[in-house]
Structures are given as structure tokens and as C-alpha cells.
Amino acid sequence: MRNFNINDFGLLPIKAATWGPFVLLNLEKENVSQKKVDSHNVSKEWQDSCSEVLSSSGIDSSLSYVCRREYTIECNWKMFEKVSIQSCEGSSEKSKENYDRLGRKAIYAFIYPNFMINRYGPWMDTNLVVPQGPNKCQVIFDYYLERSLKLSGSN
């Protein structure tokens, strides 16, 4: 196209990186084209000190997407800390049939301001809290399952 200048149409580059099944975006206004984006540094910046804990707990790209559920709830959506991690372990009894929803071990990460990652047994879910007012929010749950356990032919 003659006299077309891409800079006149607001197409601005942004920093993007992947971590496990997630795509992380940094929308800060800075000159992105001259900087190489390092996924490790972006995930460390986003997750702070919980990055290694989450990676070692099986939050990675080996999971297969299962489904989404959305709920609107009456509550204040704000979280005050940058990152909070809770974990628990079940019975010390070992079993090859630990494929229920919870399994023996669970980890719950709350990442400021509105994102949660929950990993338990072969399952993982993410919760995105979308504010709809000072005392109302929508919570979007996305579910993932270890690929080896997902039924063939399902989404």
C-alpha cells in the first residue's frame, strides 16, 4: 500500500513470555524492540519468589486444558500481598490410585492482584478474578489435567 506507515496505526510491540501453559504480557510503555525478552526473568518478576516452588510442583506445559467455568460472586476482589503460597499433604499412605481430584499433595498460589494457581494430584486450575464493582467480581476457573489421564477426543 502506498504511503502506509505502520507507526501511524498504533501497532506497538509488547513484552511477552511463556511460563508453562501461560502467556505473560507486560504492557509497560518502554522500548521493547531493543530488549530481548527472557521468559525466566519475566516469570520471576510476575511470580516473585514462588516461581521455583510452582515449577517444582508440576505447574508446567505437560498439562492439557479441560474446561472453563465462570461465577459471579458478591465480594471484595482485592488481594493485598504480591504472592502467597499455601500447600498441604494428605495421608502418608502411598497408593497407585491417587487420581482423585485432590491427590495426596496440593499447592495454592495467589499472585497479586487477581490470579490464582491451584495444583492437586493430576489436576491444576487457575482462577482469574475480574472486578465488576467494589463488592462484586466474576471468577473464571480454567481446568487442566495431566495429558496421560485426559480422555481422548475431549477438549
Image (cartoon, rainbow, N blue to C red):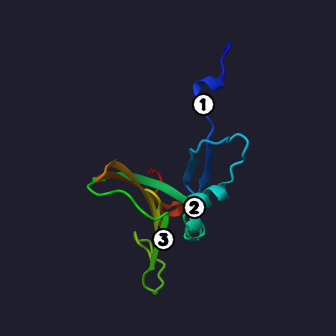
**In the picture shown, does residue 139 fall above or below 50?**
above
Residue bearing the label numbered 1? 11
- Tell me, yes or no, if residue 123 can be seen here: yes
- Tell me, yes or no, if residue 105 can be seen here: no
Q: Residue furthest bottom?
A: 92
Residue bearing the label numbered 3? 85
Q: CA distance from mark 2 to mark 1?
A: 31 Å
* Residue lying at 49% horizontally and 78% vertically, measured from the top left: 96
Quadrant of the image containing the N terminus: top right
Between 136 and 144, the one nearer to me in the picture: 136
Between 151 and 25, the one nearer to me in the picture: 25
Between 58 and 152, the one nearer to me in the picture: 58
Residue bearing the label numbered 2? 60
Q: Tell which circle, 1 or 3, labels the residue nearer the N-terminal end.
A: 1
* Residue lying at 67% horizontally and 42% vertically, measured from the top left: 32
Q: Residue furthest left?
A: 74
